[in-house]
Amino acid sequence: MSIQQTLKSAVQQAFESIYKTSIDTVEFQATRKDFDGDITIVVFPFLRVIKENPVEIATSLGTYLKEQVSTVKDFNVVKGFLNLVISDTYYASKFNSLYTTKDYGFIKPSENDTSVMVEYSSPNTNKPLHLGHIRNNLLGYAVAEIIKAAGKKVYKTQIINDRGIHICKSMLAWQRYGNGETPASTGLKGDKLVGNYYVKFDQEYKKEIQTLIADGVAEAEAKKQAPILIEAQEMLRQWEAGDEAIVTLWKTMNNWVYEGFEVTYKNLGVNFDNYYYESNTYLLGKEFVTEGLSKGVFFKKEDGSVWCDLTDEGLDEKIVLRADGTAVYMTQDIGTAIQRIKDHPDVGGLVYTVGNEQDYHFKVLFLILKKLGFVWAENLYHLSYGMVDLPSGKMKSREGTVVDADDLLINMTQTAREISEELGKLEGYSQQEKDALYKTIGLGALKYYLLKVDPKKRILFDPAASIDFQGNTGPFIQYTYARIQSILRKANFEYGTTIEDITLHAKEKSVLKQLTLFPEVVQQAAANYSPALIANYTYDLVKEYNSFYQSVPILGCDNEQEKIFRVQLSKKVGDVIKSAVGLLGIEVPERM
């Protein structure tokens, strides 16, 4: 039982004993650092039940708890806040328990519990992954790992957007200007080669628009009449009709892209349990549109297009099938969701990691799935996140102004190399060890920088600022972990035994209090789909540990019991750092 649970029960008993009334909830918060205490009870909510001065209520409660609860050593009252001092005995006992707990803070999934499926990445197959995709992948992967640590079975998945006009644009440009080149003949990753032709299409498209405008065609019409666009639209119709040559080219170029993506995913350190392809799921979506039409969920307009009326829900009418029978994004998303539950009947919820520009799309999708009668549609969640900006401005794939994911990973490693060499702390490392460390630091810096921010917030990404060995950064946390490992290597004594009787230094107690919060933070992060809670918890733990490290001797301690305890405390902090940042996909080095 946690200290909060113990205290809640005692407070409820106090109200029964003192005021002859009952309360349901007790609000706790960490005691402010400028007051004496470890945990604070907020008294103001009790005023709804007891019409007394909040200071008097707090004093009565404090007196009762000090007398009745052995772990409450003392208390003080500041206005409507009851600050409780918890005994060293409680924290020492708590530490002995968590010290010997394997995978502390994590819960194993129950066999009979429902699973959660987390979708992330979900790229188009007409361009390489870029900085925006990196935030998506890191966010989705971390959320999946956190939900798993909180006790759920998790499936990591993605939907690959491998059909549509954007794919045909790359295909057509390659047909016109590619001269048969391939990834093998050019030495380019397949996703980069195909992405180059997507940019090429846009360049030629703009030239044709300008030519039409020069011939007197209005700009809006010129954009529709450009021959290269009309040809790409015809290619899409041929693809949906199953034209053998078009389908063969489509498969060839998509496979180039898939191979390129896999290299990026491996370098980024993310993975997937299964893949879904829009080229398959849109067909199932069309089937359910037909079924929904017969049930009155959808309606057909005069031109033959099919729509869903969501005006009663405060939205508008949404197209689910074009007049010519071709699918829209909504069609395939309906099919994908249904197929996923068919494939994994144990899934009780789906988390979609998609940027906030698609907020409306997912409101509509979730409503449509509910209208189609799927019970699991009540447990769908859009993990909406803000865009990633650069000092140079917004990225545009079609203009080739994106920050390529592969290039960014290389640059992060190079920046880590330059900063590490300036600090000059790598004496005795082989070149191979140095290269591995630079990659660990660079990737850790990138991941932490993007994940420490609440997902909903927009980020201005500064690579140099992310690789700082001071402050709320990945390298600062990694360095603290490496410092702890150095202490453990130097400890030439047995420190595995439990400590029963010890007087805690204030700094030790602060670290212990932070350690005891970890299981609760994992649960909160899972419930809120927020890796930022894990990241900032870890930073707070590291700050507390470094303050402890600077304030008291560890290996130089004269008292043997205290020395053993401080090494144990260091070890557990290191374990929790590794577990916590591991949920974010960040590795920690043994030396640094």
Image (spheres, rainbow, N blue to C red):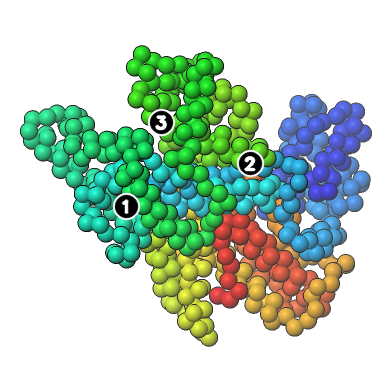
Element on which disc 1 rests: helix
* Residue 313 picture location, percent across and down: 52, 19
* Position of residue 136 measured from the top left corner of the image (x, y, whole percent): 48, 48
Q: Nearer the viewer, residue 370 or 414?
A: 370
Spatial CA span between label 3 and label 2 = 25 Å
Alpha carbon distance from label 1 to label 3 = 24 Å
Look at the numbered disc 2 and give the secondary structure of its residue.
loop
The residue labelled by disc 2 is 344
Q: In the rendered image, which quarter is residue 12 located in?
A: top right
Dot 3 falls on a residue whose secondary structure is loop
The residue to which callout 1 is attached is 195
Image: 446 above or below 490 = above
- Of residue 137 and residue 485, the one placed in the foreground of this image is 137
Cα–Cα gap, marks 2 and 1: 34 Å
> Can residue 528 be seen at all in this image of the molecule?
no
Check the image and report above or below for 127 versus 379: below
- The residue pinned by badge 3 equals 327
On the image, the x and y values in percent for residue 40 come to 74, 45
Residue 305 visible in the shown view: yes
Q: Counting residues from the N terminus, which is met first, the one under dot 1 or under dot 3?
A: 1
Q: Is residue 60 left or right of residue 223?
A: right
Please report the residue visible at 42 percent of the width from the left and 16 percent of the height from the top: 300
Q: Residues within 10 Å of mark 3 (few under 14, many from 20)?
A: many
Residue at x 65% of width, y 74% of height: 485
Badge 1 local density, few (<14 within 10 Å), some, or many (20+)?
many
Q: Which mark is residue 147?
A: none
Residue type, numbered disc 3: Ala
Q: Nearer the viewer, mark 1 or mark 3?
A: 3
Q: Residue at x 52, y 83 (%)?
A: 429
Q: What residue do we see at 45% from left, 45% from top?
A: 160
Q: What is the tally of numbered marks visible in this picture?
A: 3
